[in-house]
Image (spheres, grey):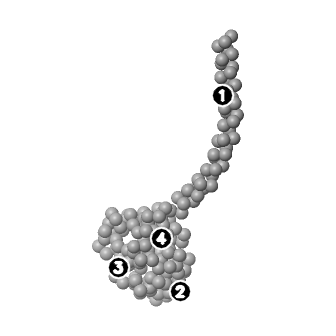
């Protein structure tokens, strides 16, 4: 059993970790089997996301003074906190996908950029493209005019070469 000192140290570590986090989703996992919980943890770990089952009293104390303070009133029942330092969309996607396959996992509340969001907003967040997808689309849009220009510039010598070749073939046929 942990001593009071160890508990205070664990609370301080959790509070420090949550201080750096701006995005979190709170879920209830009541009735979820150990196998399914392990599957969820592996999916979140693969996406570089963090997941912790937190006692309600510890949770309320840990979120005080952090960007997740709006979750303080939601620590009731069986509670787990999934959080990310930089990717709220990936977090919502992984949890939403898992919740669709396992209805025993339900959303309680969420925080994105230190602002509280409701359960409906979590589904909207999950349907958004990820940060990497948005960056790749932006890069494609920025790169497209340059590609078109390069294609047009290369077309002139290519067309000239085709015409010269055809003239050479006609002269060879005539001779």
Q: Secondary structure at mark 4?
A: strand
Which circle, 2 or 3, is nearer the viewer?
2
Instruction: Please name the residue that numbered disc 2 is placed on.
Output: 65
Whether tag 3 and tag 1 are in contact, CB under 8 A, the answer is no
Single out the residue that lies furthest toward the left.
Answer: 31
> Of residues 58 and 155, which is closer to you in this image?
155
Whole-angstrom CA distance, mark 4 to mark 3, is 17 Å
Pick whichever of labels 2 and 3 is earlier in the sequence: 2
Pick whichever of labels 3 and 1 is earlier in the sequence: 3
Whether tag 2 and tag 3 are in contact, CB under 8 A, the answer is no
Instruction: Please name the residue that numbered disc 3 is placed on.
Output: 78
Mark seen at residue 50? 4
Which circle, 4 or 1, is nearer the viewer?
1
Instruction: Please name the residue that numbered disc 1 is placed on.
Output: 162
The residue that appears at 69% across and 20% down in the rendered structure is 168
Number of other residues with Cα within 10 Å of mark 3, as a class: few under 14, some 14 to 19, many 20 or more:
some
């Amino acid at each position: 059993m942990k001593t009071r000192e160890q508990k205070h140290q664990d609370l301080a570590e959790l509070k420090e970790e949550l201080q750096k986090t701006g995005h979190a989703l709170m879920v209830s996992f009541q009735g979820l089997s150990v196998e399914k919980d392990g599957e969820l943890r592996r999916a979140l770990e693969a996406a570089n996301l963090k997941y912790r089952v937190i006692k309600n009293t510890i949770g309320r104390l840990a979120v005080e003074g952090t960007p997740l303070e709006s979750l303080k009133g939601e620590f009731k029942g069986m509670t787990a906190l999934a959080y990310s330092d930089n990717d709220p969309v990936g977090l919502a996607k992984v949890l939403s996908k898992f919740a669709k396959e396992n209805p025993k996992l339900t959303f309680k509340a969420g925080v994105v950029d230190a602002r509280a969001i409701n359960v409906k907003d979590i589904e909207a967040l999950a349907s958004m493209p990820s940060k990497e997808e948005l960056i790749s689309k932006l890069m494609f849009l920025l790169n497209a005019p340059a590609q078109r220009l390069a294609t047009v510039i290369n077309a002139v010598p290519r067309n000239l070469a085709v015409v010269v070749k055809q003239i050479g073939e006609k002269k060879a046929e005539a001779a």
